[in-house]
Image: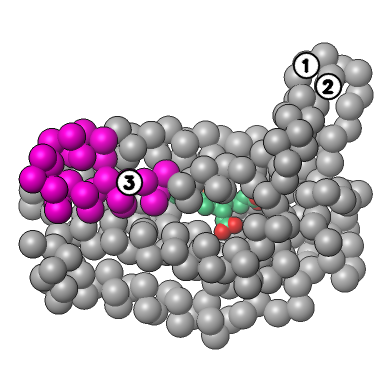
Amino acid sequence: MSTPDKPVDIPTTPQLIWDLPTRVFHWLLAVCVLGAWLTAESERSRMLHLALGYSSGVLVAWRLVWGFVGSRYARFADFVTSPAAVLSYLRAYLPQAWRAGQTQARTHYLGHNPAGGWAVVALLVVVAMADATGWASYQDGSADLWSELHELVGNGIIVLVGLHVAAVIATGLLHRENLVRAMVNGYKRARNGEGIPGAFTLLGLVLGFAMVAFTWQVYSGAFPSLTT
Ligand code: HEM
């Protein structure tokens, strides 16, 4: 069953944890979100902003599906835990608990830890909100309100992403583990048999090519109903 509910001891050999579709999704989402934020203010890069925004929406929709049918550590059931589990995980980081030798914060998780799991959900929700408010600002005559909301959510995403990257670095240092490399090559240290049996390589490649093609098509104006 789920790894977060059943923490493992400090593991020893590299095992495949993140399938390729999850890794492709992650880095494409990062490019789309950061790119859309950087191109938000300039009229000249409007088409690129729209293309990256629509692509981030498709990626989030894809991730929702993959969260139910994907490999073990990509499934929501593996990393969306109860609020009590998250609180207990975070409490173990308080100085007092740390001094008292509470070990949960130091427990190694193969997939996302309890706090990280909810951070994933929060990131997906705010990206979806940015897409929805951006889309509404194009459809609605009273665009000002939607534009304001869109900008607010966009800036909120950047704050969350900053926290996300800080948490990734802190957790990596705590466990002396390179989490960024794991999100690139898919491997983490684990006990034999804890890894996933396959990377879904073909599906990951198809996802990557399809998303690049979609972004390019939107950018080139191939879907006027989306961009005018
Ligand atoms: C550019 C700097 C970034 C770095 C270095 C980074 C790194 C990582 C790492 C290492 C993980 C896995 C965490 C774990 O082991 O539990 C992760 C997960 C995740 N990150 Fe990032 N990230 C970055 C930017 C972003 C951005 C811009 C977004 C956009 C919202 C994002 C959204 C996510 C999501 C949704 C996950 C969960 C992946 C999944 O399970 O599908 N990240 N990130």
Tell me residue 66's x, y (percent).
Answer: 57, 68
**How packed is label 2: few (under 14 Cα within 10 Å), some, or many (20 or more)?**
some
What residue is pinned by disc 1? 95
Tell me residue 209's x, y (percent).
Answer: 39, 79
Under circle 1, the secondary element is: helix
In the rendered image, residue 132 lying in the magenta stretch gets the answer: yes
Tell me residue 118's x, y (percent).
Answer: 61, 43
Query: Which residue is located at x 45 percent, y 76 percent?
Result: 207
Under circle 2, the secondary element is: helix
What's the amino acid at mark 3?
Ala
Do tag 1 and tag 2 residues touch (Cβ < 8 Å)?
yes
Bounds of the magenta segment: 126-150
* Of labels 3 and 1, the one closer to you: 3
Query: Which residue is located at x 64 percent, y 47 percent?
Result: 117
In-image side of 29 versus 132 (left or right) = right
Between the residue at mark 1 and the residue at mark 2, the CA separation in whole angstroms equals 5 Å
Between the residue at mark 3 and the residue at mark 2, the CA separation in whole angstroms equals 38 Å
Do tag 3 and tag 2 residues touch (Cβ < 8 Å)?
no
Which quarter of the picture shows residue 3? bottom right
| Mark drawn on residue 130 | 3
Query: Which residue is located at x 60 percent, y 37 percent?
Result: 167
